[in-house]
């Protein structure tokens, strides 16, 4: 039977509750596979595993319990290895990397910040900052809306100005919050977000980080921010692109 992997800890990590259940219906018992100084939190993998709410919560609950007792390197939901031996083999092969990550991430959590524009507010901001757009808007208004070509030109100018504002705001999001974090990881581009950034924050620095988020909100009222956390440090299990690495399950550890 294949092996489902929740996360990686030190082999000295405190024991989990004996009745801790993982994914599957009924919940599969969570086991600990030890290899030298490392251990993997695993269970048998259901054959029909799907990203349903119950399964996602089960995955998160295992990591939450383990994380409350010490540092855990979280694996993404759906990380599955062929068997237990495949898991311990990867632990042995990548021992130095995982030990370094456990040390670096000890006492730290992840906050993900996504930003988008409040449409009406950003249009007001663009108009206030661009005399040419204001003048053309007024000219079209006085001309009863303007010709098709004039309306088209105005629309193109507004779109370009909003795009430029998006780029500026994406930089501001990162630069405002980065000083309050220990590390930063840019998430994948996705439709609807001008910024998607994860921040590694010490547990003792959460309050200053959230204060920086409020400062960002106050200084950028045209932005809508979605802050998710504290989370296990999913985005920081692997190093940056200078050191490619495969997941313990041979799967993808990219950010959600």
Image: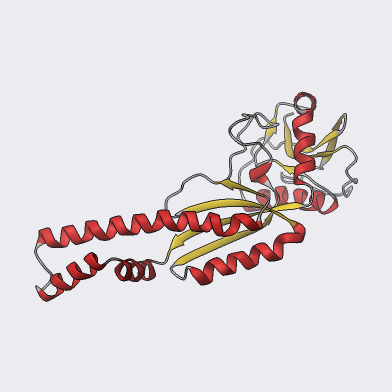
Q: Tell me the colour scheme of the image.
A: secondary structure
Does residue 84 sit above or below 41 in this rendering? above
Side of 136 where 212 appears, left or right: right
Frontmost residue, 54 versus 112: 112
- Residue extending farthest to the bottom is 142
Name the image quarter holding residue 205.
Answer: bottom right
From the viewer's perspective, is residue 7 above or below residue 209?
above
Q: Identify which residue, 171 or 94, lies in the foreground.
A: 171
Q: Is residue 223 left or right of residue 180?
A: left
Report the label total.
Answer: 0
Q: Nearer the viewer, residue 71 or 163?
A: 163
Is residue 256 something that shows in the picture? no
Q: Residue at x 60, y 51 (%)?
A: 198
On screen, residue 231 above or below 90: below
Residue sitting at 58 percent across and 44 percent down? 255
Q: Position of residue 45 (x, y in %)?
A: 72, 36
Residue 61, image x, y percentages: 75, 52
Residue 195 image offset from top left, x and y in percent = 49, 53
The image shows residue 72 at horizontal and vertical percentages of: 78, 44
Q: Nearer the viewer, residue 90 or 180?
A: 180
Q: Quadrant of the N terminus?
A: top right
Q: Residue at x 56, y 51 (%)?
A: 197
**Residue depicted at 47% across the width and 46% down the height:** 189
Is there any visible trace of residue 164 in the rendered image?
Answer: yes
Find residue 229 and report its image quarter: bottom right
């Amino acid at each position: 039977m294949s092996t489902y992997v929740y996360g990686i800890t030190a082999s000295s990590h405190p024991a989990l509750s004996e009745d801790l259940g993982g994914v599957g219906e009924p919940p599969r018992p969570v086991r600990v596979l030890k290899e030298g100084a490392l251990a993997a939190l695993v269970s048998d993998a259901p054959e029909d595993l799907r990203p349903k709410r119950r399964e996602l919560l089960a995955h998160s609950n295992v990591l939450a319990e383990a994380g409350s007792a010490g540092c855990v390197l979280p694996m993404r939901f759906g990380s599955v290895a062929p068997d237990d031996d495949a898991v311990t083999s990867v632990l042995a092969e990548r021992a130095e990397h995982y030990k370094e990550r456990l040390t670096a991430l000890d006492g730290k959590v992840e906050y993900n910040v996504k930003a988008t524009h409040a449409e009406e507010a950003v249009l007001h901001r663009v108009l206030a900052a661009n005399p040419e757009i204001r003048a053309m808007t007024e000219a079209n208004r006085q001309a009863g809306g303007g010709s098709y070509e004039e309306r088209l030109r105005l629309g193109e100018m507004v779109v370009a100005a909003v795009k430029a504002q998006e780029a500026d705001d994406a930089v501001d999001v990162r630069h405002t919050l980065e000083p309050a974090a220990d590390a930063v990881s840019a998430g994948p581009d996705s439709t609807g977000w001008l910024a998607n950034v994860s921040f590694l924050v010490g547990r003792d620095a959460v309050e200053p980080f959230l204060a920086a988020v409020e400062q960002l909100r106050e200084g950028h009222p045209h932005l809508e921010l979605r802050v998710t956390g504290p989370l296990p440090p999913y985005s920081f299990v692997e190093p940056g692109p200078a050191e490619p690495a495969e997941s313990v399950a041979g799967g993808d550890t990219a950010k959600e």
